[in-house]
Image: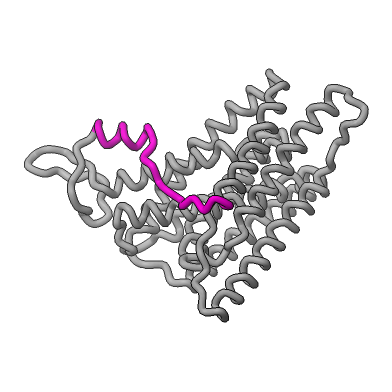
Amino acid sequence: MWIVDRGEAREFSMRQAGYWVTFYVALAVAFGILLWFTSGGDRAGEFFAGYITEYSLSVDNLFVFFIIMSRFAVPKAYQHKVLLVGILLALVMRGIFIALGAAALERFSWLFYVFGAFLVYTAINIVRQHLKGDEEEFNENVVLRWVRRAFPTTETYVGSKVTVKIDGKRMVTPMLIVMVAIGSTDLLFALDSIPAIFGLTKDPFIVFTANAFALMGLRQLYFLLGGLLQRLVYISYGLAFILGFIGVKLVLEALHASHVSWAPEIPIWVSLSVIGATMVVTTVASLVKARIDVRKGEEPHPEQV
C-alpha cells in the first residue's frame, strides 16, 4: 500500500482510484487462484467467499469514513494518508482479534452458537434501522476519547504532520486524532465482519488474508465511490441478508458437528454463490432505483446501515 503514497500530498483522481482498485482486486483473485492450485478448491472457495464478504461489508465502513473526514474537516490532499495509516492500524488490530477469536473457537465450540445468534441479531438490527430511517452517525469511542485526554492537541492541521513542537511542548495534530478514529472505528465494524468470516472458514490464515486483501483496496474504493455511495440504496438489505445467512449457517454447522441428524452442513460453493448473487442483485437494484429517482427529479437518499 505504501507504493501509492510516493511523492507529495495530493488528491486521488477517479481514474487513479479505479486503476488501483482493479489492481488490488486482481491481486486477491491471483492469490485465490494460487490457493486453488496449492491447497485445493475448498480452501480457495473459502478465501473467495471470505474476501467477497469482507469487501462487501467494508462498504459499510466507507459511510462512516466519509462522516469522520467531514466532521474533522480533513483536507482532501491528506485524506489518502489518513486512510492509509488508519487502515494499517485496523489491520494490526484485526490480526490480534482474529488470533484471539481462533483460539477461543478452538477451545470453546459453543461460541459458534453465540457468533451465529449475534450475526442474526445484527442482520435484524440493520434492517430495522434502515426501515426507521435512522441516520448514520459517528460517536467518539473509548480509544478516541482517551487519546484526546492523554495528548494535547493543536487547533488546526499542520500539513500532514501528526505531531509538532510548539513553544518547546510536543503536541499532536488533528491528523493523528482522525487516524485513530478511522482505525478504532474499523475495529468496531470488525465485531460484525470477523464472526461472519469465521462462519465461512475456521482457518485463521484464510480469515486474515481475506481481511488483509479487503482492507488493501478499501482506501482506493473510498475515492472511487465518493458520492456514488448514496446511490447504493439497497445495500443495507444485501449486507443484512449475508450476515443473517452466515449466522444461520454457523448455528446449523454447530448442530451438525454435535451430530444433530437434521442439521445440514452447507458447502462453501453454496455460501460463495449466495454471497455473490446477493451483492450483484442489491447493487443492480440500487442503481436502477437511483436512475428512476433521477428521472423523477428526486435525489437518491443514502441508505443507512
Point out residue 105 in the picture as x, y percentages from the top left corner. 68, 24
| Residue at the image position 29 percent from the left and 57 percent from the top | 73
Q: Which residues are magenta?
A: 130-150
- Position in image of residue 222 (x %, y %): 48, 60
Q: Is residue 29 magenta?
A: no
Query: 77 left or right of 107?
Result: left
Please say whether residue 208 is visible from this viewpoint. Answer: no
Q: Residue furthest front?
A: 132
Query: What colour scheme does the image use?
Result: one colour
Drawn side of residue 284 relative to residue 152, left or right: right
Residue that sits furthest to the right in the current view? 261
Q: At x 87% / y 32%, what residue is drawn?
A: 263
User: Measured along the vertical axis of the image, is residue 158 above or below residue 181?
Assistant: below
Residue in view at x 39 percent, y 36 percent: 141
- Looking at the picture, how far across and down is residue 102, in whole percent? 64, 28
Furthest-left residue in this view: 167
Vertical relation: 12 (above or below) 304: below
